[in-house]
Amino acid sequence: SIVVFLCCAIVEFFQFNLGYWILLTAVFVCQPNYSATKVRLRQRIIGTILGVIIGSLLPYLNPTLEMKLGLMVVTSTFFFFFRSNNYSFSTFFITLQVLISFDVMGFDTQSALFPRLIDTVLGSAIAWFAVSYLWPDWKYLQLDKVSRQAIQSDAQYFLHIISQLQFGKSDNLKYRIARRNAHQYAAALSTTLSNMNNEPKKYQAYLQEGFDLLKMNYSLLSYISALGAYRNKMAQLQQTTEFLSDFYPVAKKVLYALENIEKLRPEIFEKLQNSIEQSLKKIQWDETQAKNNAVFALPYQQLNLISQLLPQLYSYFQHSQKELIAK
């Protein structure tokens, strides 16, 4: 509504003869997000410039009325053909169609070339202003939210895996939802970073941290999934008292750290991390002393890999919170 009002006000104030091109350009170019609008802006301007250049050469060809009508049909057809898959070409052909139509109607085509170009630039500038300053949806602002959702969904997935390692495999609805959410939020984090790559350079400073988190999240998800693939085998094995008393308590500590990765104070997290490391070292020592624990090496290994990611994840969220407070 603001864009339409601004375009109409400019046309009325300056009394542009063909000023509706400003409104059409702004409305067609303005897209739901910055990256899409930037692409559409470039395509619109390039297509219009090429159309104006080619259109300015038409009078020198001295085409007949039949040729002009034929060109109108061809350019209109190509406009609709390219409208959904190549906006530059569609803009190029509609510009030619408009100029040829003006010539057929008896208007001075040369006098329409410059207004067409100026109106396109003005409409594009208004669209860029709108998408940049009217409720911009910069993806870097959503990075913290998507990051939290990704880690929390991983924690829920891990919770279901731990439960099924202890009590038996079950592909029930809650488990499948938790697994799907973990993968969906991982994909959402990847998409967010991909969109951030098209944002202005001053907002791309968040990209490196985001990519680091993306690697950590995919590593975490792969470690949890590896544990999930072991669920069926765990049910078939006789879980010893030593394994039950060692593995699951430390797994619950890791789960607690994942679920509260943002909320834990530094001293509490450090104490929790030390407790996890000591428990894992004790498990590894016990494993070397007892051959019957060798079959449980994979769960120990995956749990150890997950625990090694905790300090990096904690450091990321602590840093992001400080930046958010600074803003």
Image: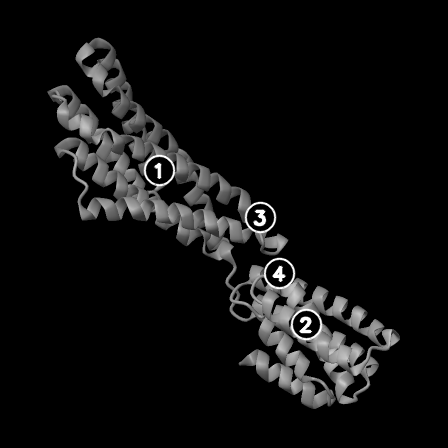
In the rendered image, residue 260, in percent from the top left (x then y), is placed at: 30, 44
Q: Is residue 130 above or below residue 176?
A: below
Given this view, does label 2 or label 4 mark the residue nearer the observer? Answer: 2
Q: Is residue 61 above or below residue 237?
A: below
**Circle 2/circle 1 CB separation < 8 Å:** no
Q: CA distance from mark 3 to mark 1?
A: 26 Å
Kindly state the secondary structure of the residue where label 1 is placed.
helix
| 220 or 18, nearer to the observer | 18
Q: CA distance from mark 4 to mark 1?
A: 34 Å
In the rendered image, residue 274, in percent from the top left (x then y), is placed at: 31, 28
In the current view of this chain or complex, which residue is farthest to the right?
A: 60
Q: Is residue 194 above or below residue 112?
A: above
Q: CA distance from mark 2 to mark 3?
A: 47 Å
Q: Residue 74's mark?
A: 2
Given this view, does label 2 or label 1 mark the residue nearer the observer? Answer: 2
Q: Amino acid at mark 3?
A: Ala
The residue under label 3 is 205
Q: Residue 39's mark?
A: 4
